[in-house]
Image (spheres, grey):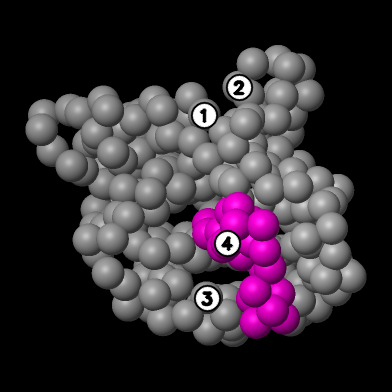
């Protein structure tokens, strides 16, 4: 079954030690979920705690959920340092802020999308200022990972010629595939040669949302149905 085989990575001790992962999106609500109380997560900027807060909580669970508390989830890189920078003050500004607070080898994740020339949801770096900020980050040795977008946009279509002609800014673009062994593109996932890899786009277990609620406490909420690019 093709994949990153994170179980093997963990078995050789690769759990994100010494790496900072900065998530850029709208908000994370209150980061006192039971999966984060022992983790080193800090806000890098102000944010609107009431806007898409569960989405941020879900993403951080996937990234750095606690491995030692014997609770609901173990993040992909549970020993990494988590930082969160809100896009409400501007996407390019948030990327620049995260870059200035990162070192070579650290990771910046862009959990965002934008409207394309065809009216479909496309990668955020379709916006020139975001593309430029990403290029500055990757030139500095920082790994930038971005959602491709949930609009089923074809990035190889003529409408995206100008976008393609900019070249490669070094960002790893991620689409969405099925959670079975076929890993087929999900219908909503933006696609094209610019999309480098895919992850599960549905059936993702993580923190937040409350599809699975324990003790009626938001700090113990989980979901089994997170998805998207």
Identify residue for label 1. Answer: 202
Which numbered disc flags the more N-terminal residue, 2 or 3? Answer: 3
Mark with earlier residue (1, 2):
2
Observer-nearest of 153 and 131? 153
Question: Which tag, 3 or 1, sits closer to the chain's start?
Answer: 3
Disc 1 to disc 4, how far (Cα)? Answer: 22 Å
Q: Quadrant of residue 226?
A: top left
Which element is circle 1 on? loop
Circles 4 and 3 in contact, beta carbons < 8 Å: no
Residue 124 lies within the magenta run:
yes
Query: Does residue 65 show up?
Result: yes
In this view, which residue lies farthest toward the left?
Answer: 216
Question: Front-most of 78 and 30?
Answer: 30
| Image quarter (top left, top right, bottom left or bottom right) of the C terminus | top right
Residue at 20%, 28% (x, y): give it: 213
For disc 3, the marked residue is 91
Lower sequence index among marks 1 and 4: 4
Could you say where residue 1 lies in the image, as x and y percent from the top left? 76, 17
In the image, 25: left or right of 132? Answer: left
Q: Position of residue 29 (x, y in %)?
A: 26, 58
Instruction: Kindly check if marks 3 and 1 are in contact, taking CB atoms under 8 A apart as contact.
Output: no
The boundaries of the magenta stretch are 109-133
- In 3D space, how far apart are the residues under numbered discs 4 and 3 (Cα atoms)? 14 Å
Foreground mark, 1 or 4? 4
């Amino acid at each position: 079954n093709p994949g990153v085989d994170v179980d093997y990575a963990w078995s050789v001790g690769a759990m994100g030690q010494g790496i900072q992962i900065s998530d850029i999106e709208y908000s994370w609500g209150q980061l006192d979920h039971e999966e984060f109380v022992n983790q080193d997560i800090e806000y890098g900027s102000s944010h609107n705690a009431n806007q898409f807060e569960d989405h941020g909580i879900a993403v951080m669970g996937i990234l750095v959920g606690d491995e030692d508390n014997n609770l609901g989830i173990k993040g992909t890189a549970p020993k990494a340092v988590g930082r969160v920078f809100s896009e409400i003050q501007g996407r390019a500004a948030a990327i620049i802020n995260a870059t200035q607070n990162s070192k070579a080898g650290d990771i910046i994740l862009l959990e965002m999308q934008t409207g394309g020339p065809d009216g479909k949801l496309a990668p955020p770096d379709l916006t020139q200022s975001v593309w430029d900020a990403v290029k500055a980050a990757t030139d500095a040795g920082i790994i930038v990972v971005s959602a491709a977008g949930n609009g089923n946009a074809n990035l190889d279509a003529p409408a995206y010629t100008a976008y393609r002609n900019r070249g490669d800014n070094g960002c790893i673009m991620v689409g969405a595939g099925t959670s079975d062994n076929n890993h087929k593109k999900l219908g909503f996932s933006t696609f094209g040669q610019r999309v480098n890899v895919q992850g599960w786009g549905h059936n993702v277990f993580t923190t937040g949302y409350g599809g699975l609620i324990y003790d009626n406490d938001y700090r113990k909420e989980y979901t089994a149905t997170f998805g998207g690019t």
